[in-house]
């Protein structure tokens, strides 16, 4: 999950054009609720906790609304 820590990226964040900050940086924190939603979505998409069936890769959309499969 993308997260650009504001403390580590303070300079680039404050110098970026204000209308592009949300586009260029992922500033919303990763919360336990988000982690639970991601796990539930991965299970619904076929991920198996025990690793059966091989690895699956997913990407969380920028809006953090859904997981999309990643090939490769």
Image (tube, helix red, strand yellow):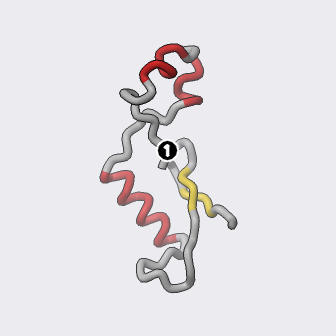
Nearest the camera: 27 or 40? 27
Q: Is residue 57 above or below residue 20?
A: below
Nearest the camera: 55 or 45? 55
- Secondary structure of residue under mark 1: loop
Nearest the camera: 72 or 67? 72
Q: Is residue 53 above or below residue 58?
A: below
Nearest the camera: 12 or 42? 12
Q: Is residue 63 above or below residue 33?
A: above
The structure residue drawn at horizontal position 36% and vertical position 59%, both measured from the top left corner, is: 36
In the image: residue 19, left or right of residue 72 = left
Instruction: Give percent across and percent down for residue 31.
Output: 33, 47
Instruction: Give percent across and percent down for residue 32.
Output: 30, 53
The structure residue drawn at horizontal position 41% and vertical position 36%, both measured from the top left corner, is: 28
Q: Residues within 10 Å of mark 1 (few under 14, many from 20)?
A: some
Label 1: which residue? 2
Q: Which residue in the rendered view is the most extreme toward the bottom?
A: 52
Q: Which residue in the rendered view is the most extreme toward the left?
A: 32
- The number of discs equals 1
Instruction: Give percent across and percent down for residue 5.
Output: 40, 34
Instruction: Give percent across and percent down for residue 45.
Output: 54, 70
The structure residue drawn at horizontal position 42% and vertical position 64%, both measured from the top left corner, is: 39
Which image quarter holds the C terminus? Answer: bottom right
The structure residue drawn at horizontal position 57% and vertical position 71%, both measured from the top left corner, is: 56
């Amino acid at each position: 999950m993308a997260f650009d820590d504001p403390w580590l990226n303070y300079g680039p964040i404050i110098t970026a054009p204000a209308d592009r900050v949300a586009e260029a940086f992922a500033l919303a924190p990763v919360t336990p609720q988000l982690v639970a939603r991601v796990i539930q979505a991965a299970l619904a998409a076929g991920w198996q906790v025990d690793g059966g069936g091989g690895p699956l890769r997913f990407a969380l959309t920028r809006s953090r609304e859904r997981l999309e499969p990643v090939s490769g």
